[in-house]
Image: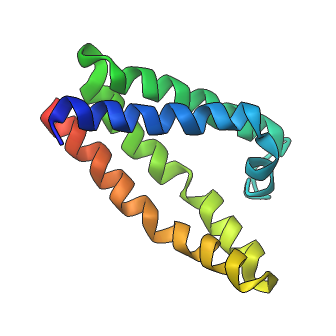
Amino acid sequence: MTKDRSALALAGLLAGMGALHFLKPRPFDRIVPRALPGSPRFWTYASGVAELAVAASVALPATRRAGSYAAAGLFAAVFPANVQMAVDARGGSPKARAIAYGRLPLQLPLIGWALKVARRA
């Protein structure tokens, strides 16, 4: 994949997930770590705004490097939500556990992808 296509694919993934935070917030509300202050919906919307802002900065060549580093940070920052999802799935169905546990290692390639886009920007 060319560097521009890779960056635009990353921006598209972030934009799609950011939009989902507003279109279907309930699944995101459920995985907000309970240790965070305030309502889960606040954190769902805040992370959606962050994903949309980062998506825009990755999409634009002038801000791509900074946006891609921000994307790597964002992928690391949402990892506790994936841990919360895995903890909550312990008593769930095998399918729910597989999905929840499968998300945990997925953050590493996403961080790597964002860093690669940043280095190539």
Residue 87: where, in percent of width, then height?
71, 75
48 lies left or right of 41: left
> Is residue 107 positioned above or below 74 on the image?
below
Q: How many marks?
A: 0
Residue 93: where, in percent of width, then height?
77, 83
- How is the model colour-coded? rainbow
Residue 4: where, in percent of width, then height?
21, 29
Residue 45: where, in percent of width, then height?
72, 32
Q: Quadrant of residue 22?
A: top right
Q: Residue furthest right?
A: 39
- At x 58%, y 39%, the residue is 17
95 lies left or right of 27: left
10 lies left or right of 79: left
Q: Quadrant of residue 20?
A: top right
> Is residue 43 positioned above or below 22 on the image?
below
Q: Quadrant of the N terminus?
A: top left
> Is residue 61 positioned above or below 66 on the image?
above
> Is residue 100 positioned above or below 55 on the image?
below
- At x 54%, y 26%, the residue is 52
23 lies left or right of 73: right
- At x 70%, y 85%, the residue is 94
